[in-house]
Amino acid sequence: MPSLPQEIEEPVLIVEPPRGLLRLDWKELWQYGELLFFLTWRDLKVKYRQALLGVAWAVLVPFMQMVVFSFVFKKVANLSTSGLPGPVFYYVNLLPWTYFANSLSMSSGSLLSNTSFLTKVYFPRVIIPTVPCLASLIDFAIAFVLLGPLLWYFDTPVGAMTLFLPVLMAVAFIVALGTGFLFSALQVRYRDIRYLLPFITQIWMYGTVIFPFSALSEYGWLRYVYALNPMAGVVEGFRWCLFSETIRAAGYTADPPWFLLAIGAPVAWAILLTGLFYFKKMERTFADII
């Protein structure tokens, strides 16, 4: 008699939580890289699809802030701009800061704005607050283009250290990603964080872009406190990379920002690890709370 066909056993997929302090599965993140790309592209299209000025908003926001800061802090308060024209000084300061502020603003509310996505489909949740940090890089690139005409108008030459700018942007990305992880997880549990965050960002901005680090030379201990702000090293580094020769020619100090980066870069990594640790700790409760 012919033998009966044996019953074929279906493979069983066992899903286990990743182990380790941060419980982050890098292999899984790589597998979902395409999802990260399409979500980033979706965010860009949604942001500018029905906007009156389109991508011009990426330039208009730092430009208008530059105008206000140049009038208030340069013309009225007469604060030092290290020999640079006020508009150039403040616009260069605002370029990395605007990237960070926009990334934090969008990533902090990203979990709440993707509620249906989170509760119906499985994917690594860290992708959601990462997407705004990547999308904001496009805004930064667009705003950076305006720097050329601005430098031409004020006849401000650019130094030879511009190749160091990607390193500074990497630090800004780390800070944006870490704060995005932290505040997005906090906002799921504490909804009033959304009202506190703009105030925190505003105070943080005034302590970063208003005056150069050299203005604190008379306050020894305050320099170390100021250096704990990782974005201070990024902003100071942008000015040094672009205008160190121009600042020295005007008779001002233009030291490399190694002191700020030596303190600020480890703080940036600490922010990233702290934000990621808290995010992964709260991740299992997102679907229940949200």
Image (spheres, rainbow, N blue to C red):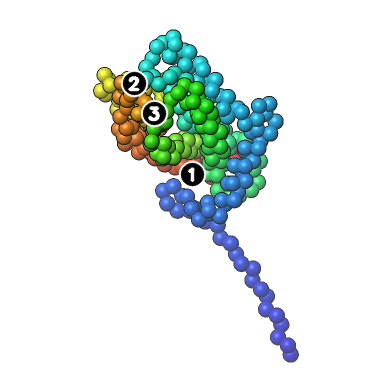
Res 280 label:
1
- Cβ–Cβ under 8 Å for marks 1 and 2: no
Amino acid at circle 3 = Phe
Q: Residue at 59% across / 51% down in the picture?
A: 34
Q: How many marks?
A: 3
In the image, 155 versus 236, the foreground residue is: 155
Callout 3: few (<14), some (14-19), or many (20+) C-alpha neighbours within 10 Å?
many
Quarter of the image for the N terminus: give it.
bottom right
State the SS at label 2.
loop
Q: Residue at 62% across / 42% down in the picture?
A: 41
- Note whether residue 158 is visible: yes
Left of 255 or right of it: where is 153? right
Residue with the mark numbered 2: 250
Amino acid at circle 1 = Lys
Q: Is residue 213 above or below residue 49?
A: above
State the SS at label 3.
helix
- Note whether residue 203 is visible: no
> How far apart, in angstroms, are the residues tagged by discs 1 and 2?
50 Å
Residue depth check, mark 3 versus mark 1: number of the one nearer the observer:
3
Callout 2: few (<14), some (14-19), or many (20+) C-alpha neighbours within 10 Å?
few
Among numbered discs 1 and 2, the one appearing first in the sequence: 2
Q: Quadrant of residue 236?
A: top left
> How far apart, in angstroms, are the residues tagged by discs 3 and 1?
41 Å
Q: Is residue 176 above or below residue 209?
A: below
Query: Residue 260: x, y in percent?
Result: 33, 32
Residue with the mark numbered 3: 243
